[in-house]
Image: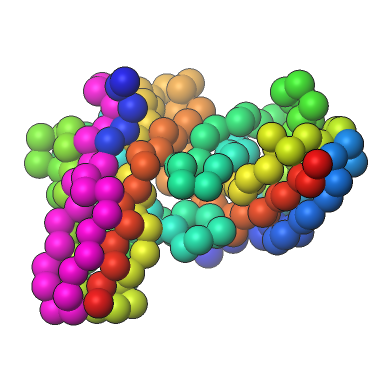
Amino acid sequence: TQLLEQSPQFLSIQEGENLTVYCNSSSVFSSLQWYRQEPGEGPVLLVTVVTGGEVKKLKRLTFQFGDARKDSSLHITAAQPGDTGLYLCAGAAAGNNRKLIWGLGTSLAVNP
Amino acid sequence: GAGVSQSPRYKVTKRGQDVALRCDPISGHVSLYWYRQALGQGPEFLTYFNYEAQQDKSGLPNDRFSAERPEGSISTLTIQRTEQRDSAMYRCASSLLAGGAQLIYNEQFFGPGTRLTVL
């Protein structure tokens, strides 16, 4: 069974601080996605990483896929209250890209 | 808007009743997924379809849960003889996934969910 472990589970920081969220597995994924979910809404895709070692930037967010495609990280620089939400990683199951394996999520609160 | 829609948004039922949750995916999307999500946690996979074919139902908790997508568009998740432990947010998602190179970019678009409460 493929599992994705996310850490930390909860994070409360002050505006302007940096943070990193980790997503780890013992399994190899063909691709990995990061989603953000706001209260009362469904998850919304932020980025998909495909190549081992790949780094993608989305404004203040930096996403990295591990060289072995087993782990990923999301780094937020100078967090803002608007970054508050649930961050989810999801990996495309080996041999079946149509089914995603989801992490449990990191609940981020950025305080003004 | 042309997003994923779900109905009803809220459903309160009594234990033992059957419920049917509906999902209307984005037009043209091949794949449709059903998830259950606890507050503050990631989605728990239930089942998914490609067109009208149910590809994987390994996440359905037991045989009281079933899903169909008879014409490859709208899908219904049915829970028979509901129990209090079935209370949750049920989310539907769809993705384009036409195959080939697009296969690795399985962006899933989520609906607003149905909040089910079993009394």
Residue A47 picture quarter: top right
Q: Is residue B30 above or below residue A100?
A: above
Asked if one can make out residue B86 in the rendered structure from this viewpoint, the answer is yes
Q: Point out residue A52 in the picture as x, y percentages from the top left corner.
A: 74, 34
Q: Is residue A28 left or right of residue B3?
A: right
Residue A4 picture quarter: bottom right
User: What span is colored magenta in the figure?
Assistant: B6-29
Asked if the magenta segment contains residue A68, the reply would be no
Q: How many marks?
A: 0
The residue lying furthest to the front in this view is: A112
Q: Quadrant of the C terminus of chain A?
A: top right
The residue lying furthest to the right in this view is: A17
Q: Nearer the viewer, residue A103 or A108?
A: A108
Q: Is residue A41 left or right of residue B34?
A: right
Q: Point out residue B18 in the picture as x, y percentages from the top left corner.
A: 11, 68
Q: Point out residue B91 in the picture as x, y percentages from the top left corner.
A: 36, 49
Asked if one can make out residue B49 in the rendered structure from this viewpoint, the answer is no
Q: Point out residue A46 in the picture as x, y percentages from the top left corner.
A: 61, 31
- Residue drawn where x is 70% and y is 61% of the image: A9
Q: Nearer the viewer, residue B89 or A8?
A: B89
Protein image colouring: rainbow
Q: Nearer the viewer, residue B40 or A89?
A: B40
Q: Is residue B2 above or below residue B5?
A: above
Q: Nearer the viewer, residue B6 or A2?
A: B6
- Residue drawn where x is 30% and y is 52% of the image: B114
Q: Is residue B97 left or right of residue A43?
A: left
- Residue drawn where x is 61% and y is 48% of the image: A86
